[in-house]
Every structure is written in structure tokens, then in C-alpha cells.
Image (cartoon, helix red, strand yellow):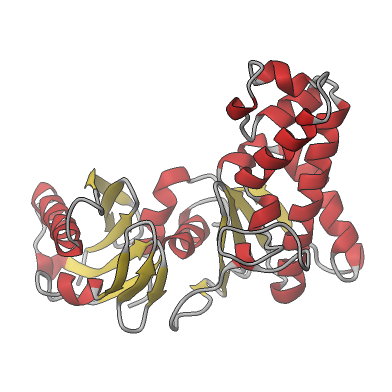
Amino acid sequence: MAKYRIGVDLGGTSIKVGIFSGNGELLGKKNSATDPFCRSWREVVADMAGLIEGLFRENGAVEADCHSIGVGTPGLIDSRKGTVVYASNFNWERVPILEELKRRFDLPMALANDADCAVLGETVAGAAKGAKNKNVVMFTLGTGVGGGVVLDGRLSGGGPGKMELGHTIIVAGGEPCRCGILGCLEAYASATALIRDASRAAEDDRDSKMWELCGGELSNMNGRIPFDAMRAGDKTAKRVVENYIGYLGVGVANAINIWRPDIILLGGGIANEGDGLILPLTERVRANVFAGDRGCLPIIKRATMGNDAGLYGAAALNV
């Protein structure tokens, strides 16, 4: 009987690999630098294989002891073919990542987008572990807005590509998004968007507390400063934060109206605001979701696993 599962989380700066017991316990992990622009994708996959072999040795395991290998990677993926269709941050196109990995290991394998792996990881071992029906939607609020959906304990989708929660349109003809479309959720609810709006508002109000917190330089603005200034009584910052939460609330309400999950998870740096974000967001969502309190509103909470979520999710991929 297979004792282990392997999870691989491929990121822009590092390759992380974990070995898990059959019941999902993380037994050990290793990492190395990715450097995708300095070398070929084959070299990156070779490093993955080396890390996996190292974990086998450290745990007294052999390939026959392993149930499967799951890989999470950024970009547009085709999970059926095991191919990274396009990853802009790696400059990869049509990379047959699982085919290459199978040259080293004769094991069942699965490939998924890294954001999908993160929500699956939170579902099997993190903030959504106790979800009654295992229906979870997660938004990651960082430089962009990512996310994924788990329905009945399984990732939703699986064909070419993946859903892009951050690129749903919430304002027709609105702010330009990095993807080239106008009005995406990402253009309003990412940390990048919050910084943009806070800087614009501070430009119009030289008395705003945000100037002091930026050290007099708007180039120092970050996603925490508007919240800190609001807590200090700054009305301009309060307006910025309320607008930000309003837009995020539209995106979350849309997700609830489509999937009716048990839990909405928030990850990324902005989610660290905790109740300062989640409580007013819950009120906005309640006002925007169909049937309001008459329906079954999901709990909105912060993701808890941090950088390990992708490892757990990759190891839990169905093969």
C-alpha cells in the first residue's frame, strides 16, 4: 500500500516540494531557487525531480512507496494534458511539465494552477477543513486577484485553462486591468488597486494621515497604510477603504450567487487586516447577495496556511 504523496509548489522565486503521509501529514519539505529566466524549463523540472528524490532518501522511501505526485504552477494550464499552456512570469509556453517529470518517475501525476492548489490545501488542512459540504471559494488579494473553487471537496474545472475570478467584470468600461480588459475585479480589489486609489485620494488631500504614514512620499504607499490611517480617524482614508471593500463585496457576492459555498476564504496581504476587512465586507455582501439573510450566507474568513497551502493542495490533487 502506498505510504506517501508528493506535492510540488512551483513559484516565481522558489520550487517547494513536500512529502506527505497517507493521511495528509506533512513529513518534510525541501526547496530551491526557480530562476526561470536564467535557464530552461527542463532544468527547472530536473530540480523538481532532484528535490523529490532527496525527500525519498531523507524519509527512507522509494518510488514504489509513493501514491502520486501533484504539481501546482502559475499560469494557464491544461490539466488533462499535464501542460503549462502559458505562464507569463516564467516566459513559458506549451511546456509539457508532467511528460518531462514522468521521465524520472513512473507514478500517477496531476497538474493544477497554483491558486487552485491553495484553495484545495485550505480545504483539506486549513481554514476550510471543517466545511460541512466542502464547498469553498477563495480569493487571494495581492498584486492581482486570484482564486479558486472547490465543490464537494474537489477542484471545480479541470479542462484547458482555469477560472479567473479576478477577471470577472464588475464595472463595465471601468479601470484598465493588467490583462488588457476594462473593469475587472482585479482592477478594483487587488492590493495594487488599493494603492492606486489611496495615492489618488492623498494627492487630493494634503492633510490626509496617509502622507505621514508614507513618509511624505506616495511611492511608499502600501495596502496597509489606508487601513492604518482610517483607524487613526482620517476621513479620506476611510472613504478609500470603504470604496475598496464595496468593490470586493461585489466580487464576493457574485461568487456566492453562482456557487453558494459554505465558506469564502480571503488570502494575500490585504486579508491580514482581519476583522477590519472581514466585518464590513460581510455587511456589504449581505446587502448585495440574492435573498440576503433569507438565503444561506457563507462565512467569510481569512485563509490560515500561508505559503504551505499550495503544497498541501498539490499533494491532495486527484490523479
Query: Residue 167: image x %, image y %?
Result: 62, 66
Question: Relative to 70, is 209 on the left or the right?
Answer: right
Quadrant the N terminus occupies: bottom left
Q: How many marks?
A: 0
In the foreground, 219 or 263 = 219
Q: State the residue at coordinates (90%, 70%).
A: 291
Question: Relative to 252, is 60 on the left or the right?
Answer: left
Tell me if residue 67 comes above or below residue 252 in the rendering. below
Q: State the residue at coordinates (11%, 58%).
A: 61
**Residue 238 visible in the displayed image:** yes
Q: Tell me the quarter of the picture where residue 163 sits.
A: bottom right
Q: State the residue at coordinates (27%, 52%).
A: 18
Q: State the residue at coordinates (23%, 77%).
A: 108
**Residue 131 visible in the displayed image:** no
Query: Residue 319: image x %, image y %?
Result: 32, 78
Question: Relative to 169, is 58 on the left or the right?
Answer: left
In the foreground, 59 or 183 = 183
Tell me if residue 142 comes above or below residue 219 in the rendering. below
In the foreground, 57 or 90 = 90
Query: Residue 281: image x %, image y %?
Result: 79, 48
Tell me if residue 242 comes above or below residue 1 in the rendering. above
Question: Relative to 11, is 207 on the left or the right?
Answer: right
Query: Residue 180: image x %, image y %?
Result: 59, 65
